[in-house]
Image (spheres, helix red, strand yellow):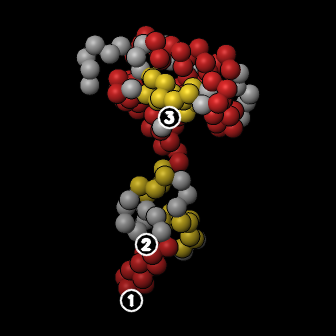
Amino acid sequence: MREDLDVTKLRINTVTKLFILMLLYDGPKHGYELIKTLSKTLLFKINPEQVYPFLHKLHKQGLARVVKVLERDKKVYELTEEGREAVEMLLERFSNLIEIAIAPKVNVCAGCGVKIYGDGYVEVIDGKELHFCCKHCAEHYKAMKLKIRK
C-alpha cells in the first residue's frame, strides 16, 4: 500500500460514490452503465451529475483511467493500481461498519460450524429451526443426532 495515498481527498460522502468505486473495483465500466446499475441497485434514480464529475475527479487524481472510447464518445473507466489500493483502504476503514451491517444475516451451520452469509439450507428439527450450509450437513446432523439417541 502506498503511504502517500490519501483517500480522504476523495470525499466519499455518499453511498453513490462508494458504489461507483465498488463497481469500478469489480471491472471497467462506462458512465451510463454505472448510472443504470446504481439506479437498479439503490432503487432510486441516479443523475449523470452524480456520476460523471466523480469519474472525472478519479481520473484527474490518477485513481482511474479511460481504457477505451466507445460510440458517441462513451468513455470506459477502470481503476488504476492506486485506485484499487484506495478502494482497499476504504474497505479496511469501513470493515467494522460492513461487519455490523451483515452480522444479522450471518448464520452458523449447525452441522459443520461454517459461517453462512444468507439463508443457506434451513430445516426444522425437533421443533427448532436450524441453519445449515447445505442439505448434506443437515442429513449428517440428523444421522448423528439419531446415533446419540440410540
Question: Along the line of sight, which residue is nearer the eye, 147 or 137?
Answer: 137
Give the residue at the far bottom of this rendering: 150
Q: For numbered disc 2, what is the local secondary structure?
A: helix
Residue occupying the point 43% across, 65% down = 110
What amino acid type should be assigned to the residue bearing mark 2? Cys
Residue occupying the point 46% across, 78% down = 139
Q: Which residue is mark 1?
A: 150
Question: Along the line of sight, which residue is nearer the eye, 32 or 86?
Answer: 32
Q: For numbered disc 1, what is the local secondary structure?
A: loop
Q: Which residue is mark 2?
A: 137
Q: Earlier in the sequence, mark 3 or mark 2?
A: 3
Which mark, residue 28?
3
Q: Earlier in the sequence, mark 1 or mark 3?
A: 3
Q: For numbered disc 3, what is the local secondary structure?
A: loop
Residue occupying the point 50% across, 42% down = 102
What amino acid type should be assigned to the residue bearing mark 3? Pro
The answer to whether any part of residue 97 appears in the image is no
User: Are circles 3 and 2 on residues that touch, CB within 8 Å?
Assistant: no
